Image (cartoon, rainbow, N blue to C red):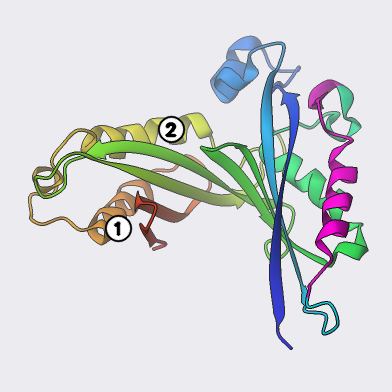
Amino acid sequence: MPSVLLTKRIEFAAAHRYHKPEWDEAKNRAVFGLCYNPPAHGHNYMVEVTVLGKVDPKTGMVVNLFDLKRTLLNVLEEFDHKNLNLDMPYFEGRIPTSENLACVLWSKLDAQKDIGTLHAIRLYEDEDLYAEVTAAAGLDVASVTRRYSFTALQDGHQGREWDCFVTVHGTIDPVTGMVTDIGALDRLVQDKVVQTFGHHELRQAFGTQPVTGEQLVKHIWTQLVSSLSTGRLSNVRLVQSRDLSFEYAG
């Protein structure tokens, strides 16, 4: 019988700050931006935990959902409403970025053998930013996905809002705890995507007509793929509506 993936979502709240005490303020601000600001800032984190297993012929389940939820609550209770920098020993000398926090949660949950085989953990800081670690890639690498929105005219119709999800994959920097410089990524996407297409007619921006979602997502990939400061562009997903999206991965 083939294996099945099961994903459970659960929330917790915590605060963190990006800060290297051996760096001066100028360097901390240059590298970490607003995440450096003291004393800390909080998030209502959303965790998606995906486990892999075969369907039990007696129960019809990969794992008992009640047991999975209870295990997740027990693990996350340690982090809930804590200052990750000050209260959690896992981050002594280690910046509590989403990438590093996802790895810590992986280590805690991977020890819980009654929930099946851990396949992936996706950690949302908010709706616009999440980090993901997987069994296949290992815990020294992660993916970070950032959402950007812009409104553009398509084929002369009323302006349509697009959501653009940009995913960067790479090694977690042991110094910064990040896969890529989010501030630099924000500036790149603003320049190459949001300002280029925002409140513009797509036919004029492309010089052709009509412009399809397939063309647009591939064009965005082409504009970004060679310009990242760190990490590797692994996916661009362009959402036109709740019922229609386009993806390109090179």
Say above or below: 155 vs 188.
below
Say above or below: 104 vs 18.
below
Residue 69 image offset from top left, x and y in percent: 82, 52
Q: Which residue is mark 1?
A: 218
Q: Which residues are magenta?
A: 61-86
Residue 51 image offset from top left, x and y in percent: 75, 64
**Residue at left 70%, top 85%?**
2
Residue 43 image offset from top left, x and y in percent: 67, 28
Residue 79 falls within the magenta-colored stretch: yes
Say above or below: 1 vs 23.
below
Name the residue type under label 2: Asp
Nearer to the camera, 16 or 142: 16
**Residue at left 16%, top 36%?**
200
Q: Which residue is mark 2?
A: 186
**Residue at left 59%, top 24%?**
32
Nearer to the camera, 140 or 6: 6
